[in-house]
Image (cartoon, rainbow, N blue to C red):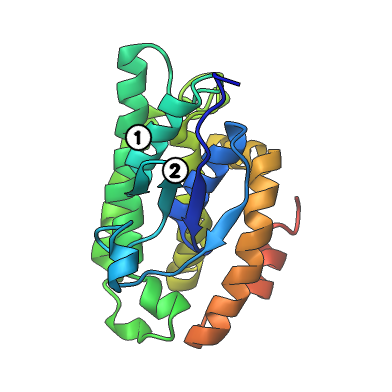
Amino acid sequence: MANDPPSVRLHGYPVSNWFNFVRAAMIEKGLGGDFVPARMARDPAFLANSAMGKIPWLETPHGGLAESVPILEYLEDIAPERPLLPPDPYERAKVRQIVNVVQLYIEAPMRELYPAVFMGGDREEAPVASSLDMVGRAFTALDQLCGFAPFARGNALTAADLALFYTLELGERVSRHMTGRSLFEGRPQLAEWDKMVRSRESTGIVLTDFASAFADYRAEKGAAWDEARYQKERFAHA
């Protein structure tokens, strides 16, 4: 049919929160959940599709497209019937603002702690204080930007929900391992929101593949992280 969106395929690795963000968006938009397994690479063939050698990248009829936010924007353009950005210009900008806060001020500082948690690195050398200080500031910003009524920005799922959910999937593990505290502590609205997003069909599909890939990744890296203990403690009362 003339109105069918172009065929696209996502390349990446289910341990990556930004890969999972894009994959969940594709499922929510009815574009399918299949993907091509890929890790970061620097060979010419990979760089031809992802100029920085990063994942995810999207295979389109016109060539490769990389970076999660531009990919999301492209998906919005080719499949507008199930939007993940609001129609109102101001609300669209606020959703983008939340995605930026998540990407720059939660995911980026948390990533500084990944080696000590997931990659067999030295816990004593991890910049815990500075990283978690920035994350705390980001949560203060989210208190202002997000109503969680019931979604991050109103009554419909948006890109803000997906960016935050999949970033917190790793961030919660980092916080518990490095500090013994949950990012959801003292934030009941955030906890209820997490349960709601977790119950979605797209989330189930994405997290099933995450669990398998994450187990292999931890074994590969000799990670200190105890996933079985985390699952028992985090979801004991679910």
Residue 152 coordinates in the image, percent (x, y): 48, 29
- Identify residue type, mark 2: Ala
Q: Position of residue 215 (x, y in %)?
A: 62, 75
- Left or right of 131? Residue 164 is right
Residue closer to the observer: 199 or 64: 64
In this picture, is 222 found above or below 42? below
Q: Are marks 2 and 1 in contact (CB under 8 Å)?
A: yes
Q: Residue at x 25, y 61 (%)?
A: 52
Distance (Cα) linking label 2 and label 1: 8 Å
Looking at the rendering, in which quadrant would you find the N terminus?
top right
Q: Residue at x 32, y 39 (%)?
A: 70
Looking at the picture, tell me which residue is in the foreground, 219 or 26. Answer: 26
Residue 62 x, y percent position in the rendering? 36, 41
Q: Nearer the viewer, residue 114 or 34?
A: 34
* Relative to 23, 46 lies left or right: left
How packed is label 1: few (under 14 Cα within 10 Å), some, or many (20 or more)?
many
If you read the primary sequence from the N terminus, does the residue marked by circle 2 or circle 1 appear first? 1
Residue visible at 31% across and 14% down?
89
**Circle 2: is it few (<14), some (14-19), or many (20+) Cα within 10 Å?**
many
Kindly identify which numbered label has been placed on residue 135. none
The residue that mark 1 highlights is: 98
Above or below for 238 versus 99 = below
Extreme-top residue of the structure? 88
Question: What type is the residue that disc 1 sits on?
Answer: Ile
Residue 151 spot, x, y in % from top left? 54, 27
Which structural element holds mark 2? helix
Please say whether residue 146 is visible from this viewpoint.
Answer: yes
Q: Quadrant of residue 163?
A: top left
Find numbered disc 1 in the image and state the secondary structure of the residue it sits on. helix
- The dot on residue 163 is 2
Query: Taking the image as drawn, is residue 181 in sight?
Result: no
Residue at the image position 49 percent from the left and 72 percent from the top: 177
